[in-house]
């Protein structure tokens, strides 16, 4: 995602400061998005797509078509955005291995979305479903590991169950959308 934000921004001859002003945020946030350190929240991603006149599918790496389609962009952002935010929140205190594996899972999910978007049938729904399920279990393990670490150091990871249930709902929504797209 980070390379695409930078590419489109530069193609539109915009600076990070230009984007930051339009989004009413700090330039540091734009820099972090472009480096891949953080991801934009839902509403900021929608606004970013409007400013850059490109689709969220393109920025998220789901599609190679940068054409802006407002309704489609909002639908994807509203589905994938909460998943990304939940994973990011769940892994804030996780160890590097958990963070790396989570990134790998996200990349796999984005790849599956990309395949579905191209209408290729090579990614089976069973494989997608099992990937979503194992992603949820893995994130739960990361959260539990982080919670144990936080208890040892006197810090407590808040909202573990809420974050996990939000993640599960988001993944289930994503799965339903993909199943419907096959019809």
Image: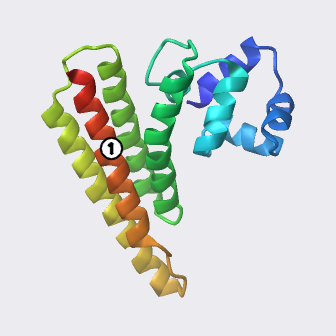
Q: Quadrant where the N terminus lies?
A: top right
Q: Secondary structure at mark 1?
A: helix
**Residue positioned 64% across, 26% down in the render:** 49
- Give the residue displayed 42% in from the left and 76% down from the top: 147
- Which of the 4 image quadrants contains residue 107? top left
Q: Is residue 147 above or below residue 119?
A: below
Q: Name the residue carrying label 1.
A: 173
Residue lying furthest front:
71
Residue 129 can be seen, yes or no: yes
**Residue 40 in view:** no
**Crowding at mark 1 (Cα within 10 Å: few <14, some 14-19, many 20+):** some
The percent coordinates of residue 119 (x first, y second) are 28, 14
Q: Please tell me whether residue 179 is drawn above or below residue 145 in the rendered image.
A: above
Give above or below for 149 relative to 2.
below
Judging depth in this view, the residue of 43 and 140 nearest the camera is 43
Q: Looking at the image, which is closer to me, 50 or 2?
A: 50
Tell me residue 156's x, y (percent).
51, 81
Residue 112 in picture, x, y percent from top left: 31, 28
Side (left or right) of 130 relative to 31 = left
């Amino acid at each position: 995602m980070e390379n695409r934000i930078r590419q489109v921004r530069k193609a539109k001859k915009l600076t990070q400061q230009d984007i930051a002003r339009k989004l009413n945020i700090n330039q540091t946030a734009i820099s972090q998005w472009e480096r891949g350190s953080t991801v934009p929240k839902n509403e900021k991603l929608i606004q970013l797509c409007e400013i850059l006149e490109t689709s969220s599918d393109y920025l998220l790496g789901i599609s190679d078509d940068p054409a802006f389609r407002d309704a489609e962009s909002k639908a994807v952002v509203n589905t994938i955005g909460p998943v990304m935010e939940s994973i990011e929140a769940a892994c804030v205190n996780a160890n590097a291995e958990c963070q790396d594996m989570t990134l790998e899972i996200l990349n796999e999910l984005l790849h599956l979305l990309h395949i579905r978007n191209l209408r290729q049938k090579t990614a089976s729904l069973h494989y997608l479903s099992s990937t979503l399920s194992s992603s949820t279990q893995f994130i739960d393990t990361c959260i539990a590991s982080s919670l144990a670490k936080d208890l040892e150091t006197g810090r407590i990871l808040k909202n573990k169950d809420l974050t996990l249930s939000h993640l599960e709902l988001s993944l289930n929504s994503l799965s339903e959308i993909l199943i419907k797209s096959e019809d």
